[in-house]
Image (tube, rainbow, N blue to C red):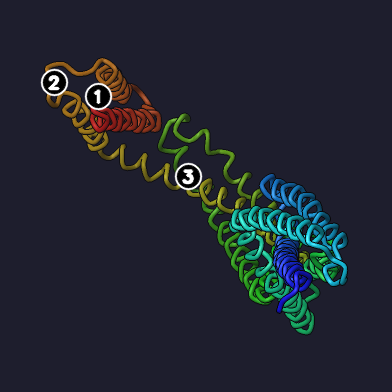
Amino acid sequence: MTTARSWWRRGDDNLRADAQAAKDAAAQAFYELDTAQRDLVISIETITAVDNSPAAQRAAADFHALGTRIDQVSGAYIAAVDAHDLDRDELDASAAGRARTELTRAKDDLARVKGELDRFAEGLGPLLGKAETQLARLAPAVERARQALLGASNALDAVRAAGLRADDLAARLAALAPELTKLNQGAGTHGVPETLKRAEEVLRGAEAVRTEAERLPERTQEIDKRLASLRTRAQALSTRAEGVDPILSELRRRFSLACWQDLQHVPAQAGTTVAQAEAKLTEAAKARDEQRWADATSLLGAARALLDDLDGTVSAAGDRLRKLNEVLKDPKAEIDKTRFAIRDAQRLAMQGRTTPEPRHARPLDDAVGRLDRAIAALHGRHPDYWHFLTETTAVRETASRVVANIREDRAAGR
């Protein structure tokens, strides 16, 4: 027969078991919260190592606030466990009941904060994804920068082996050495964004040095070819310039002073310009021998510009004689060509209208008057044929501008 004492004993055992179950459940909740917090610490450290944006800073601050709440509920749980020894023999019903109540409350608090932590973790998804992407780029970016530096160094060695100093390229490569040192120190010292940026800058700088080094032999050959070509051209222009004096003599003999006066300086100017160009070419050759490639290229460009100007100046005398001969032989052809340009513009101005726009008609009327005056000047003694040609050219340019303006207006619906 069961005694009253054994009945109460079984009741105490049941309460002890309930309290122990509450303790186990609280321990599981504590473990899950602690694990989730540890995982999130890694996520937050990943984000803050990469991202310094306001969103990342808010996430770190929010996690810190969550950490405070986690510490509070964890402390309450630990205090509840410490307050109740469920293994002691003299545990009575009231003590077991209090233990179960406090441990259940601790478990619920732990689970509630765990829920907050889970929701916070879900919201970190975009920031964490961005940070992990940057971290994934970090090692390959640094390795590409190192390989680019190695490639530039090898290209520079090859150029030097071919007898080219490439001092400027060597200096540019040497300037990248401190950046390599910082890359080797790693993102832990300088941060992920700064390290990625530095790796990209080193890559670009090293690739530029490598490309220029590999092209240096070809560039040297190009400079040599340009030197030879420009020297030949200078000699040819000097020879052509010698033919200007006979042309000027013919102009003086057959045409009025106004037709050739502006060309009298050409022979002297040609000699001066050829001398200047040849001096530039001599400097360029010296710069090439000293492997000052940028200076050589600049000097060659200056020599070419001088020769281009001289080419136009020397050609001007021959062109002037040819045009004057043409107009002397048949001024009517020039007159007809100019009148046709005016009439063509007038027809376009009247197209679809009873009267032309004043801003189109006025310059055309002025052009007609200008042409008539130029024609009248031809009938005087010693006519200025060059003035006649410049006037007819100006009249055709006026007609061409009017045509362009009319077409622009109509294209715009005006």
The tag on residue 353 is 2
x then y, percent, for residue 255:
41, 34
Mark 2 or mark 3, earlier in chain: 3
Is residue 35 something that shows in the picture?
Answer: no
At x 61%, y 54%, the residue is 119
In-front residue for pair 319/150 = 150
Tell whether 339 sits left or right of 50.
left
x then y, percent, for residue 165:
81, 74
Tell whether 272 sits left or right of 264.
right
> How many residues crowd around disc 3 within 10 Å: few (fewer than 14), some, or many (20 or more)?
many
In-front residue for pair 92/373 = 92
In-front residue for pair 275/298 = 298
At x 24%, y 24%, the residue is 414
CB atoms of marks 2 and 3 within 8 Å: no
The tag on residue 414 is 1
The tag on residue 317 is 3
Q: Amino acid at mark 2?
A: Arg
The tag on residue 319 is none
x then y, percent, for residue 89:
87, 72
Q: CA distance from mark 1 to mark 3?
A: 45 Å
Q: Which quadrant would the N terminus be assigned to in this image?
A: bottom right
Q: Amino acid at mark 1?
A: Arg
Mark 2 or mark 1, earlier in chain: 2
> Number of marks in the image?
3
At x 57%, y 49%, the residue is 310
Asked which quadrant contains residue 9, the reply is bottom right
**Residue at the farthest front position:** 1
